[in-house]
Image: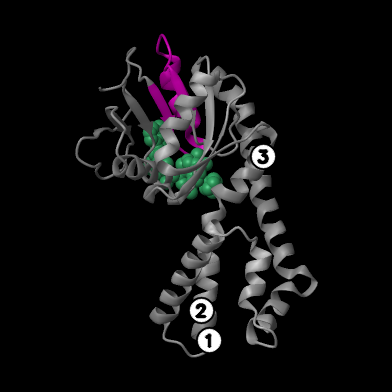
Amino acid sequence: MSEGALWLVGAGNMGGAMLRGWLAAPGLQRPITVIDPFIEQVPQGVTLLRELPSGDEQPDILVLAVKPQQLDAVRGVFEQKTGAPRLLLSILAGVETETLRQAFSVEHSVRAMPNLPVSIGEGVTALYSGTADNGVRAEAAGLVAPLGLIEWIDNEALFDAVTALSGCGPGFLFRFIDAMASAGEALGLPADQAMRLAVATVKGSGLLAAQSTEGPEVLADRVASPGGSTREGLNVLDAEDRLKHLMRETLAAAARRNAELAAAARAS
Ligand SMILES: NC(=O)C1=CN([C@@H]2O[C@H](COP(=O)(O)OP(=O)(O)OC[C@H]3O[C@@H](n4cnc5c(N)ncnc54)[C@H](OP(=O)(O)O)[C@@H]3O)[C@@H](O)[C@H]2O)C=CC1
Ligand SMILES: O=C(O)[C@@H]1CCC=N1
């Protein structure tokens, strides 16, 4: 049975990734309309509009996937409408549910933080809502379930940290893959081969970590044969907790920026 319309506002890197994830998974019966001024094309069966419809037309579910700095333009159109979407799901980094609830006059807003692998159904989406009842929460979770793992966050104050870890995380890991490959290249491997080895190594290690009952520390020890070469490499990463410090600084910088975006959204 067909369900109410879903409008996806903004189909850039992340909105586009969610759209691909939804279309690849069976189950989503809703008509989808993408609103994006510049995206070149959308898959068959999806309606593309260059701007939000004026007038009182409303979707059943509104998914906001524009940059936080573009929220005002979208809000401006919805302010002219009577009524409101039944469910608002926002993936905007830093923008709080109360800001969204007031801006769009919705009863319930759900904040989501997906990450780029949602495009292949292997992402993680953190969810928060301070007001949604169990029915709305189940509906929001059902919407993002085809995209990968779901994690509900109890305290919205932690959302900036979640964003820094799992939202931005793929960006940090892609850098890590690059660094591993270029280090292999520096040891004499051809560039393309070094990249294939690095990507497959990260993929396999991630899968193993996800399936194993043992934590990453134990798994690292399993790689480090006594008296062997891995330990020498781990000693470099572990010296003065170098890698830990680097990751702490990296996530702290990202979390700070999320807090700045939230402050800007509250003030606008
Ligand atoms: N990238 C990621 O991995 C993640 C991003 N996010 C969040 O997703 C949101 C989007 O980020 P990202 O996809 O990286 O950014 P993008 O710039 O790639 O995507 C935003 C899209 O929205 C379009 N757009 C701008 N104004 C409007 C408008 N008024 N109506 C409809 N569409 C509009 C943009 O067009 P144009 O480019 O021409 O402005 C662009 O295509 C952000 O809020 C971010 O915090 C969350 C998790 C992960
Ligand atoms: O960089 C950003 O602001 C967004 C939020 C999480 C990932 N990308």
Residue 85 vs residue 98: left or right? left
Q: Residue 182 shows which numbered tag?
A: 2
Q: Is mark 2 within 8 Å of ligand 1?
A: no
Amino acid, disc 2: Ser
Image quadrant, ligand 1: top left
Whether residue 145 is visible, yes or no, is yes
Q: Do the CB atoms of the residues marked 2 and 1 lie less than 8 Å apart?
A: yes
Q: Position of residue 188 (x, y in %)?
A: 48, 90
Q: Is residue 165 above or below residue 143?
A: below
Tell which residue pokes out farthest to the left in this image. 44
Q: Residues within 10 Å of mark 1 (few under 14, many from 20)?
A: few
Q: Is residue 29 above or below residue 230?
A: above
User: Which residue position holds label 1?
Assistant: 186
The secondary element bearing badge 3 is classed as helix
Q: Residues within 10 Å of mark 2 (few under 14, many from 20)?
A: some
Amino acid, disc 1: Ala
Tell which residue pokes out farthest to the front in this image. 213
Tell us which disc is closer to us: 3 or 1.
1
Q: Position of residue 51 (x, y in %)?
A: 32, 29
Q: Which residues are magenta?
A: 61-88
Q: Position of residue 105 (x, y in %)?
A: 51, 14
What is the CA distance from the residue labelled 3 to the residue labelled 1? 39 Å
At 54% from the left and 31% from the top, the residue drawn is 111
